[in-house]
Amino acid sequence: MGKMNVKKFIEIMSVAEKLKNNTRHSWTSSNRHESVAEHSWRLSLMAYFVKDEFPYADINKVILMCICHDLGEAITGDIPSFNKNESDDIVENKEVHQLINNLPEPYNKELSKLFLEMQAQETIESKLYKALDKMEVLIQHNEADISTWIPLEYELNLTHGEKEVEFSNYMKDLKQAINEDTMNKIQHAKESIS
């Protein structure tokens, strides 16, 4: 009971491998599309590095949320937030639940509970994961060449994640610092044109 069958393990890993292949809307500083897996990896690293700022949060749970949050995209592929609507969320949730239901005990129950917590956005852990998720995207945009930005991102980058960081002064400070980088990047691009 609760043991991970090796064949099942390999099968799960091959589903997860799709997150290495599926690219996101974001570009890296070396001018290539980033993968979903790369976003999730750095998001997990971000969670680890803010643990001292959130001593009352279960940071291992936050890291697990960061690792698993885009599992549904192994099936759906990435849908950029500005193109995402309710039906996309429902599809992604359906895919995630299907994926989780196919997992052996106790993983299916644990991850099911985790995803419900992430969706409910009531715990400190779920709020922290969500805010970091938004901030990772912005940091990545600031690291990419500005030529990869689409017009709406000049404004969207400054407002994206505003609501999600509200719960914490540290996260608000982080958002502010990222915004400054964004404004400097836009200013620098304007100066190099003129």
Image: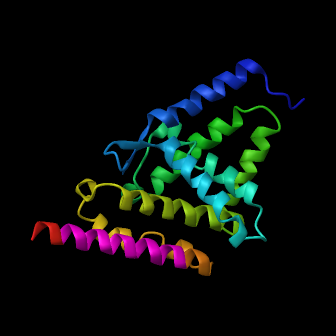
In the rendered image, which quarter is residue 2 located in? top right
Taking depth in this image into account, of 153 and 54 the one nearest to the observer is 54
Identify which residue is drawn at 77% across, 70% down: 55
Q: Is residue 94 visible?
A: yes
* Horizontal and vertical percent position of residue 148: 26, 53
Q: Residue furthest top?
A: 7
Relative image position of residue 78 (x, y in whole percent): 43, 45
Please tell me which residue lies in front, 35 or 144: 144
Q: Which residue lies furthest to the bottom in this view?
A: 169
Residue at 52 percent of width and 41 percent of height: 37
Say whether residue 58 is magenta.
no
Q: In the shown orientation, is residue 123 left or right of residue 74?
A: right
Query: Would residue 186 be counted in the magenta stretch?
Result: yes
Q: Residue at x 56, y 67 (%)?
A: 131
Q: Quick one: quadrant of the C terminus?
A: bottom left
| Predominant SS of the magenta segment | helix
Q: In this view, does 38 lie above or below 21?
A: below
Q: Percent from the top left, x then y, of residue 180?
A: 39, 76
The magenta-colored residue range is 173-190
- As drawn, the residue found furthest toward the right would be 1
Where residue 111 appears, as percent x and y from the top left, is: 72, 46
Q: In this view, does 56 lie above or below 95?
A: below
* Quadrant in which residue 154 is drawn: bottom left
